[in-house]
Image: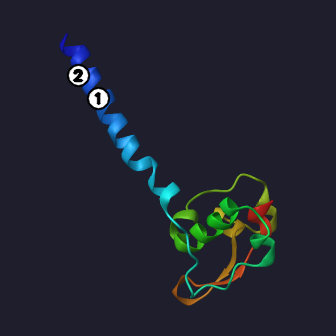
Amino acid sequence: MKRITSLLFLLTLIAIVAAGCGSKLDDESWKLDKKHQPLPDYVLNTSNKIQETYIMASTYPEVIAQVPCYCGCKADGHKSNLDCFIHNMGPNNAVEEWDSHGIA
């Protein structure tokens, strides 16, 4: 009986944590910081999700840079997923040039 109670408590705790974490990204409105170059037309002519992904890459470059890319773009000189969205970053992590690989 103690084992079942512990299992139910653990499952309830996991459900509460998942519910609390799951809705933040859906409710957040992503805006491009003014320090970055504006999104190019090839991004603006895509879905909102792709545009948001480019903005997220510019907002959290240190996180995206830790994600390896497995799509074969290493031949293009890409070292991480960040290179699929941002071609060149300047001082203060400001995007100076976007990369079109992220819409492919």
Q: Residue at x 40, y 49 (%)?
A: 21
Q: Is residue 80 visible?
A: no
Locate the N terminus and report the quarter of the image it occupies: top left
Quarter of the image for residue 56 reads bottom right
Q: Which mark is residue 10?
A: 1
- Spatial CA span between label 2 and label 1: 6 Å
Q: Amino acid at mark 1?
A: Leu
Which percent across, then down, holds residue 2? 18, 14
Give the structural element (helix, strand or loop) at label 2. helix
Which percent across, then down, holds residue 51? 68, 67
Q: Residue at x 78, y 60 (%)?
A: 73
Q: Amino acid at mark 2?
A: Ser
Task: Please report contact status of discs 2 and 1: CB closer than 8 Å, yes or no.
Answer: yes
Which percent across, then down, holds residue 49? 66, 59
Q: Residue at x 75, y 71 (%)?
A: 43
Q: Residue at x 55, y 89 (%)?
A: 91
